[in-house]
Amino acid sequence: MPQLDIRDLHAHYGREPVLQGVSLSAERGEVVGLIGPSGSGKSTLLRALVGLTQPSAGEVLVDDRRIDYRDRASQRWLRERLAIVFQQYNLFQNMTVLRNVTIAPLEIQKRSKAEVEALATTLLDKVGMGHKRDAYPDELSGGQQQRVAIARALALRPEILLLDEVTSALDPERVNEVLDTIRALTREGITMLIVSHEMAFVREVSTRVVMMDHGRVVETGPPAQIFDTPREDRTRQFVSRILRH
Amino acid sequence: MNYDFDYADVLQQLPYLLGGALVSLQIAFVAFFAGALLGLGGALGRVHGPRPLQRAIGAYVTFFTNTPALVQVFFLYYALPDAGVLLSPLTCVLIGFVLNSAAYLTEILRAGVVSVRRAELEAAATLNMSRLQIVRHVILPHVTRMIYAPLSNFFIILVLGSSMAALFGVEELTGRAINVSTTNLRTIETFSVVAVIYILITFVASLSLALLGRWAFRVHARIF
Ligand SMILES: Nc1ncnc2c1ncn2[C@@H]1O[C@H](COP(=O)(O)OP(=O)(O)OP(=O)(O)O)[C@@H](O)[C@H]1O
Ligand SMILES: [Mg+2]
């Protein structure tokens, strides 16, 4: 039984169809890399998964339980298990780095202060932001903000983690740090859906890669298949164009 | 001008006048905080509420910001007893001021509420914050910080505007000044002292508001 099962998901922005029947699943502890051209609907898929964009058809199952996105309780249940780091920076500007990381575990999950602060410190160190715990987001670079956002998501102790282009704003040195962090997470058994334009990164960390285009899944397979011997022309085209850069 | 200034009679009444100043401040505080509470609800409803609610709030704001506060209080002052509601002049004035400041504060706070970045609201939602928690942890701190300056200015306006209550027999600073000057017949002296008291109040209020803003909300405004 897959931990995350997406079946024929549709979504629209206004009248424009953005997801046109996406199906994909992830086993527990699996790292699924999501690639595809700009505008293919990768971010929308993640947004629909967390319920920020209402799916218009299809279903999502987590641990075999069907999510009802119109029901608050069902959404809350989902969001207790699933964390997301967005493409754009979205830290709370009025809170320090530390508070950004601890607010949800403390105020919403009601975990103990000692445990949460210890975990936050560990996580911030892990993403190389320990020395900035008292800074405010507007005092940080974009890449630094993104690292804090990763720590904030991890502090929730999610079972499923959605990452939307989290490395795009990082300098090369930091990409490796984040990569290490993510690699360590896979060993902890967190299921991950990673959207990225960094093919080497996707290839390295993914157990499976999903290629999307025009709101549909074009091809799914192990990294070696997608990057070396793609079955679909569209995948070959996209991958070769990107790898040449 | 050969007018002999004589402040002795006024200064003798200083404690009485200062007591009035306290009443003025009380009126301003009630109008401000009750108005801000209603105004926050108004601003949230205006921005995030359903359409009919947005319209209703819009109409309320338009009505109260386009008619003089004095007229509104007059209306209440005479209409309420007619409707069988008998209230003290002070209560009546307070109700009028709160309704009026709620309208202005809805507009002021709305500017802050719309400036909350969507990304933060979405992050809050995915962190499982309830609506109330989003207001408390994300919207309110942001709004307070963004519109701190117009907010403190409005408080000063309310302090000065509270003098209107004198017209309804409320013994706040201006009301007491009228009482004093009609007995000692030293109108110029009395009102110059009262002006100084108003200046002191607003000065102290601005200063404390600016310091509070710095300390509590990271507002980096100039103090003077
Ligand atoms: N808020 C929105 N309103 C209307 N249309 C939108 C909105 N967000 C995205 N879209 C449209 O939906 C489509 C998919 O966008 P999406 O952001 O999911 O793509 P993406 O695969 O994440 O692209 P990128 O790699 O550039 O991040 C695009 O055509 C985009 O124009
Ligand atoms: Mg995207």
Image (tube, grey):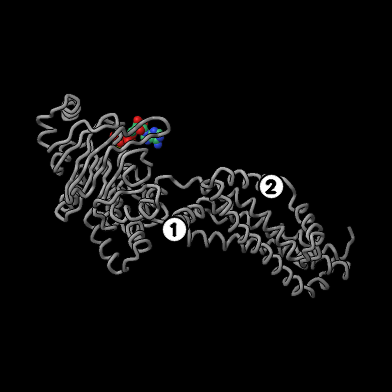
- Side (left or right) of A167 relative to B199: left
- Res. B193 visible in picture: no
Give the quarter of the image for residue A120. Answer: bottom left
Q: Chain of mark 2?
A: B
Q: Position of residue B78 (x, y in %)?
A: 82, 58
Q: Nearer the viewer, residue A11 or A225?
A: A11
Q: Nearer the viewer, residue B122 or B27?
A: B122
Q: Is residue A183 above or below residue A12?
A: below
Instruction: Tell me what residue is drawn at x 29 percent, y 29 percent.
Output: A214
**Given the image, on which type of amino acid does mark 1 rest?**
Gln
- Element on which disc 1 rests: helix
Q: Position of residue B81 (x, y in %)?
A: 81, 62
Residue marked by disc 2:
B65
Counting residues from the start of the chain, the first of labels 1 and 2 encountered is 2
- Side (left or right) of B178 relative to A64: right
On-image quarter of the C terminus of chain A: top left
**Given the image, on which type of amino acid does mark 2 rest?**
Thr
Closest to the camera, between mark 1 and mark 2, is 1
Q: Nearer the viewer, residue B178 or B196?
A: B178
- Side (left or right) of B22 relative to B187: left
Q: Chain of mark 1?
A: B
Q: CA distance from mark 1 to mark 2?
A: 31 Å
- Side (left or right) of B32 relative to A229: right
Instruction: Tell me what residue is drawn at x 22 percent, y 38 percent.
Output: A34
Q: Nearer the viewer, residue B94 or A218?
A: A218
Q: Is residue B197 above or below residue A29?
A: below
Q: Which mark is residue B133?
A: 1
Q: Position of residue A173 (x, y in %)?
A: 19, 45
- Element on which disc 2 rests: helix
